[in-house]
Image (cartoon, rainbow, N blue to C red):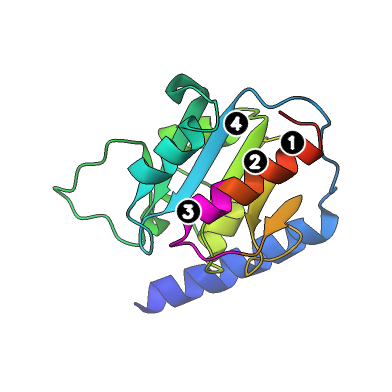
């Protein structure tokens, strides 16, 4: 418990420092690949969210998913790569190879599907090599290039708004 508090304190310092140096450059390229970072602690309907994205014209192979959960039980099995606070060191290094691969992949679009400021999620989002990042208004504005005012539970509204504005921005 105490270690978690200290870890979150140091992660907050690391993320804040990196966000101050962050370049908010975004790409004008068309979107072909999508990275989806989901906080499963608060949102469990990831399959429905993926189906809503597929309904907008993207193939399932073009969508990569990384699941974040505060605590992962030993016998818990996920359909997608997962990461937890346990996989992040106090210095901000990520030990999970699947999460590192997700971060290093240069997605055309990264959807940060979480609405609670958790510094482990912010660190993953900030470290991501994605060219265009989208998220919710409740998250630090410096993390995402584009923000949508919606609730996490309303994934259909979120995807409708997202793809409406992506068409306006000429990204799809």
Q: Nearer the viewer, residue 108 or 81?
A: 108
Task: Measure how far apart labels 4 and 3 are at the Cα level.
Answer: 26 Å
Q: Please provide the residue range marked out in magenta.
A: 150-159
What secondary structure is marked by label 4? Answer: helix
Look at 56% across and 53% down and name the residue there.
Answer: 158
Question: Which residue, given by chain and number where applicable, does mark 1 sit on?
Answer: 167
Identify the residue under disc 3: 155
Whole-angstrom CA distance, mark 2 to mark 4, is 24 Å
Q: Does the residue at mark 4 contact the one at mark 3 (Cβ under 8 Å)?
A: no
In the rendered image, the quadrant that contains the N terminus is bottom left
Q: Residues within 10 Å of mark 2 (few under 14, many from 20)?
A: some
First along the sequence among labels 1 and 4: 4
Q: Is residue 67 left or right of residue 127?
A: left
Residue under label 4, please give it: 104
Q: Is residue 63 above or below residue 169?
A: above
The local crowd at label 1, few if under 14, some if 14 to 19, many if 20 or more residues have their Cα within 10 Å, is few
Q: Is residue 146 magenta?
A: no
Q: Which percent across, then down, holds residue 156? A: 49, 51
C-alpha distance separating marks 3 and 2? 12 Å
Secondary structure of residue under mark 1: helix
Label count reads: 4
Please identify, in this view, whether the residue under mark 1 or under mark 4 is nearer the observer: 1
Label 1 and label 4: CA atoms lie apart by 26 Å
Does the stretch in magenta take in 156? yes
Q: Position of residue 88 (x, y in %)?
A: 46, 53
Residue 163's tag is: 2
Q: Earlier in the sequence, mark 3 or mark 2?
A: 3
Earlier-in-chain disc, 2 versus 4: 4
Residue depicted at x 56% and y 73%: 9
Distance between mark 3 and mark 1 Cα atoms: 18 Å
**Quadrant including the C terminus:** top right
Between the residue at mark 1 and the residue at mark 2, the CA separation in whole angstroms equals: 6 Å
């Amino acid at each position: 418990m105490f270690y978690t508090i200290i870890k979150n304190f140091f992660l907050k310092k690391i993320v804040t420092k990196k966000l101050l140096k962050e370049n908010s450059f975004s790409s004008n390229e068309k979107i072909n690949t999508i990275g989806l970072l989901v906080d499963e602690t608060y949102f469990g309907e990831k399959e429905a969210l993926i189906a809503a994205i597929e309904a907008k014209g993207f193939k399932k192979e073009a969508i990569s998913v990384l699941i974040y959960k505060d605590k992962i039980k030993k016998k818990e099995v996920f359909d997608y790569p997962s990461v937890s606070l346990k996989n992040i060191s106090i210095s901000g290094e990520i030990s999970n190879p699947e999460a590192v691969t997700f971060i290093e992949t240069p997605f055309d679009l990264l959807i940060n599907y979480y609405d609670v400021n958790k510094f482990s999620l912010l660190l993953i989002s900030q470290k991501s090599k994605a060219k265009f990042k989208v998220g919710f208004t409740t998250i630090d504005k410096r993390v995402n290039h584009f923000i949508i005012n919606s609730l996490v539970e309303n994934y259909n509204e979120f995807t409708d708004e997202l793809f409406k504005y992506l068409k306006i921005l000429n990204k799809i």
